[in-house]
């Protein structure tokens, strides 16, 4: 069992990355091997809309996303983690999401091997934990269309500002570890 996390925060010690690490800790405790990828460190461009993937089944851009496709294909579960930036995920993670378009054929059927579980982790400054719920749900729908399972759960860290704040929230960390364990069960 392999669980990976793809994190969208540009802050290496950011709240969403702390929570993603905690999810991976829970998964590792349940026996998984894990790895973490920071979208901000990847040298990659966004989807160019060339539709070459529709012809040959894969993206023709050769950059850091090439290896990440392989990591996603090998994984049994993928955690997508991001702070909310302007009511959505960060641009860094959105680049990755757009590049997953390569898995869709012209008929919008996905070539991604089926059965991969998903964990979604978002952090936000807004204290209302439900403030962006429709957006988080819609990310889950997009991932489902891309061939992932319906998200195992959507963990939201609300009211978080300074980097590192999530490390003080025991309940949130516990929920993150529990999510990691569920991804492995
Ligand atoms: C450019 C930018 C845009 C943001 N937009 C929002 C927003 O729309 N709603 C919100 O609740 N918080 C917003 N925030 C606050 C972050 O979501 C919050 O601080 C989060 O905990 C940061 O996560 P990180 O530590 O993983 O980077 C924004 C922060 C930045 C820097």
Image (cartoon, helix red, strand yellow):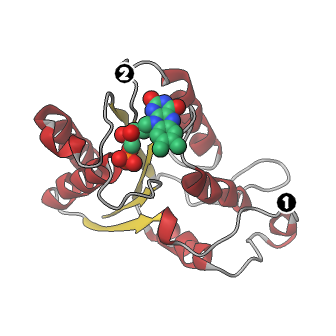
Q: Residue at x 83, y 48 (%)?
A: 107
Q: Is residue 66 above or below residue 107?
A: below
The image quarter in which residue 6 lies: bottom left
10 relative position to 100: left or right: left
- Side of 7 relative to 53 (left or right): left
- CA neighbours of label 2 inside 10 A, class few (<14), some (14 to 19), many (20+): some
User: As displayed, is residue 135 above or below residue 41?
Assistant: above
- State the SS at label 1: loop
Q: Which residue is labeled 1 in the image?
A: 49
Q: Residue at x 19, y 57 (%)?
A: 25
The residue that appears at 38% across and 57% down in the rendered structure is 11
Q: Residue furthest bottom?
A: 62
Check mark 1 vs ligand 1: CB closer than 8 Å? yes or no: no
Direction from residue 110 to residue 131 in the image, left or right? left
Q: In this view, does 78 lie above or below 142?
A: below
**Image spot of residue 144 (x, y percent):** 58, 41
Give how far apart the Cα atoms at labels 1 and 2 are. 35 Å
């Amino acid at each position: 069992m392999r669980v990976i996390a793809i994190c969208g925060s540009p802050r290496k010690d950011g709240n969403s990355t702390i929570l993603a690490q905690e999810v991976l800790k829970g998964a590792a405790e349940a026996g998984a091997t894990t790895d973490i990828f920071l979208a901000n460190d990847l040298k990659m461009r966004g989807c160019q809309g060339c539709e070459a993937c529709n012809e040959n089944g894969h993206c023709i851009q050769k950059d850091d996303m090439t290896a990440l496709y392989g990591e996603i294909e090998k994984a049994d579960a993928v955690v997508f983690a991001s702070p909310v930036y302007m009511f959505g995920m960060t641009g860094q993670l959105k680049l990755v999401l757009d590049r997953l378009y390569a898995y869709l054929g012209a008929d919008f059927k996905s070539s991604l091997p089926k059965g991969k579980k998903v964990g979604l982790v978002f952090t936000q400054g807004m204290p209302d934990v439900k403030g962006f719920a429709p957006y988080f749900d819609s990310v889950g729908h997009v991932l489902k269309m891309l061939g992932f399972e319906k998200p195992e759960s959507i963990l939201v860290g609300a009211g978080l500002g300074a980097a590192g704040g999530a490390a003080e929230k025991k309940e949130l960390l516990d929920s993150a570890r529990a999510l990691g364990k569920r991804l492995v069960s």
